[in-house]
Amino acid sequence: MNPIVLIPARMASTRLPGKPLADIAGKPMIVQVLERAREAGFPRLAVAAAEADIRDAVITAGGEAVLTRPEHPSGSDRIFEALEALDPEGRHDAVINLQGDLPTLEPSAIRAVATALETSGADIATLIAPCAEEDRDNPNVVKAVVSLTPGARVGRALYFTRATAPSGEGPLWHHIGIYAYRRAALARFVALPPSPLEIREKLEQLRALEAGMTIAAAVVGGVPLGVDTPHDLEKARAILAAPGERKS
C-alpha cells in the first residue's frame, strides 16, 4: 500500500473554540498531531483545513495543508475533498483519517491501523482498546462489537454502539475513532446517504456496515487523550511538556 495520512481540522468547537491552533508545548495542536504522524514513519501527510488560519499555521511549521470547503458534515467528507485535490493521479491507494485533536497519540497506533487495513483485506480499518470499568455504561464512549479470537490482535467489527455491548462475560472494547480506508472504499463511503442506524446511534461508521462494507478492528494498548475541553488541553500540555511521557 501507498497510504497518505490526512488530518481534518476546523476551528468550530462548542467546548473548545479554535482548538486546532491551541498552543501545546510551543506549537499549535494541529502541528503536534502532524508530528505524531511523521514520527510514525509515513512519507506523506497533510492537513485538510476548513479555515485558512489552520492551513497557514501548518504551512508555517513546514507541513502540507489544503483548504477545503467549511460546510462538510464530517471529517470523512473533508479528507475526501483533500485527497482529490492533493492526489488527482491516484498514487495513494489508502488513506488514514487521523483526528486533529489527538496530540499525544502514540505513533505506533497510527502504524497499527495501517497494518490492519493492509493485512485484513477489509474495506476500512479502525482501532479498539480495552474499555475501562467506569466507561462501560457511558453513552459518550462508543463500544465496538468485534469478532476476535482469543489472542488475536485484529478482528472483524460487527457493530458499534453507545450502549453497553456485548453482554455476558468477556472483554468490552472502547472504539478509537481513527480510520484507514482503501481509496475506493472512501469514495464509496462518502457517496452513500446517512443510514438509519447511523442516524439512530449518531455513529458515522454504521453507514459503512449497513452498506455491506467490512471494517477490521485492531487492538492497541490504551485510549489516547482526545482534547475536547480546556481541562483536556491542560492535560495534553503537561504530557508534552514532560520528556519521556510518550513512547512510540
Image (cartoon, rainbow, N blue to C red):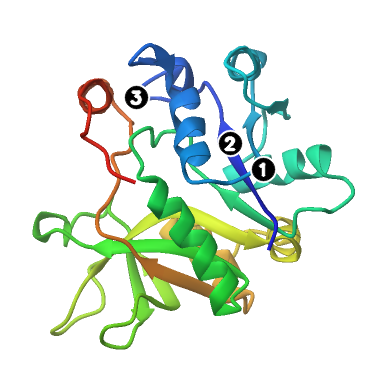
Give the percent coordinates (x, y) of residue 128: 34, 63
Neighbours of disc 1 within 10 Å: few (<14), some (14-19), many (20+): many
Above or below, comparing residue 207 to residue 153 in the picture = above
Q: Which badge, 1 or 3, comes first in the chain's sequence?
A: 3
Residue type at tag 3: Arg
Q: CA distance from mark 1 to mark 2?
A: 6 Å
What is the number of the mark on residue 21?
A: none
* Quadrant housing residue 43: top right
Above or below, comparing residue 207 to residue 135 in the picture = below
Q: Residue at x 49, y 26 (%)?
A: 30
What is the number of the mark on residue 15?
A: 3
Give the percent coordinates (x, y) of residue 208: 59, 68
Observer-nearest of 140 and 86: 86
The answer to whether mark 1 and mark 2 are in CB contact below 8 A is yes
Q: Residue at x 50, y 69 (%)?
A: 116
* Quadrant housing residue 32: top left
Q: CA distance from mark 3 to mark 2?
A: 18 Å
Residue type at tag 2: Pro
The answer to whether mark 3 and mark 2 are in CB contact below 8 A is no
Q: Residue at x 74, y 64 (%)?
A: 188
Q: Which residue is mark 2?
A: 8
Neighbours of disc 2 within 10 Å: few (<14), some (14-19), many (20+): many
Give the percent coordinates (x, y) of residue 72: 66, 37
Residue type at tag 1: Ile
